[in-house]
C-alpha cells in the first residue's frame, strides 16, 4: 500500500498520522513489503474507511498506526505522540486509553460476555463505567448478548 493525502490539517485536528510509513515482513526468509512510503492523516471527529484489495496492507497499516506492530521505516503518531519513541509499558497504556479496536479475527475472550469484552480495557484501567459517557442505557444493555 502506498498513499498520499492532499491537505495538511493543523496538529490539533489530527487524531493519527503516518509519514513515510513502511513495513516489511520477513516471511521465512522471503521479504514481504506490505507498506511503502504511506502518508496519511486521520482527523479528529471524522469517520475514515481504508479500502483496498486483500493483501494490500490495510490491516498492517492499522496495526502499525495503533502501536500493535512496529514500523520498518517512517513514523506513526497518535495525537502528536510518536509511537516509535514509546516503551512497551507506555504503548500498552496508550492503546488501552486512546484506541478502540475491532479485530478482523475478533480476538474476543470466550469466557466473557460481549459487553464485558468491550468494557475490559476500562476495567483494567480502573475506571468506573459511570465516568464513560458512551455507556449504554440499561434498556439498550439488556438487548446485548449476555448483557
Ligand atoms: N505476519 C506476517 N508475516 C508475513 N507477511 C505478512 C504478515 N502479515 C501480513 N503479511 C503480508 O503483508 C501483506 C499485507 O497484508 P494485510 O494483512 O495487511 O492485508 P489486508 O489489506 O489487511 O488484507 P485483507 O483484506 O485480506 O485483510 C500481504 O502480502 C500479507 O501476506
Ligand atoms: Mg486485513
Image: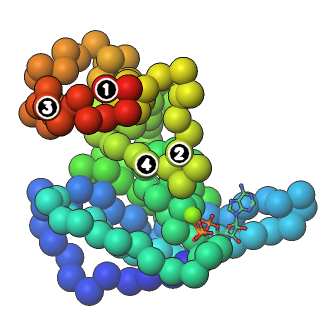
Answer with mark 3 or mark 1, whichever residue precedes in sequence. 3
Where on the picture, by quarter, is residue 137?
top left
- Tell me how far mark 2 sits from mark 3, CA to CA: 25 Å
Image quarter in which the C terminus is found: top left
The residue shown at (52%, 35%) is 108
SS type, badge 3? helix
Instruction: Report if the beta carbon of the residue with label 4 is closer than 8 angstroms to ligand 2.
Output: no
Where on the picture, by quarter, is residue 98?
top left
Instruction: Report if the beta carbon of the residue with label 3 is closer than 8 angstroms to ligand 2.
Output: no
Q: Is residue 73 visible?
A: no
SS type, badge 2? loop
Q: Position of residue 103 (x, y in %)?
A: 50, 49
Query: Which of 59/10 is in front?
Result: 59
Answer with mark 2 or mark 1, whichever residue precedes in sequence. 2
Label 2: how many residues lie within 10 Å, few (<14), some (14-19) or many (20+)? few
Labels 4 & 2 near each other (Cβ < 8 A): yes
The residue shown at (47%, 22%) is 112
**Residue occupied by mark 3:** 139
- Tell me how far mark 2 sits from mark 1, CA to CA: 18 Å
Labels 2 & 3 near each other (Cβ < 8 A): no
Q: Position of residue 117 (x, y in %)?
A: 42, 29
**Residue occupied by mark 1:** 147
**Residue occupied by mark 2:** 106
Amino acid at each position: 500500500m502506498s498513499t498520499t493525502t492532499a491537505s495538511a490539517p493543523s496538529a490539533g485536528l489530527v487524531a493519527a498520522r503516518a509519514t513515510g510509513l513502511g513495513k516489511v515482513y520477513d516471511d521465512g526468509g522471503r521479504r514481504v513489503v506490505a507498506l511503502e512510503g504511506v502518508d496519511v492523516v486521520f482527523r479528529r471527529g471524522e469517520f475514515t474507511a481504508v479500502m483496498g484489495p486483500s493483501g494490500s496492507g490495510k490491516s498492517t497499516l492499522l496495526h502499525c498506526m495503533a502501536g500493535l506492530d512496529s514500523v520498518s521505516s517512517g513514523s506513526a503518531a497518535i495525537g502528536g505522540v510518536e509511537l516509535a519513541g514509546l516503551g512497551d509499558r507506555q504503548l500498552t497504556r496508550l492503546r488501552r486509553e486512546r484506541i478502540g479496536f475491532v479485530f478482523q479475527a475478533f480476538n474476543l475472550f470466550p469466557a466473557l460476555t460481549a459487553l464485558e469484552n468491550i468494557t475490559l480495557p476500562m476495567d483494567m484501567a480502573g475506571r468506573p463505567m459511570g465516568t464513560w459517557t458512551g455507556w449504554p442505557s440499561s434498556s439498550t444493555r439488556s438487548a446485548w448478548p449476555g448483557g
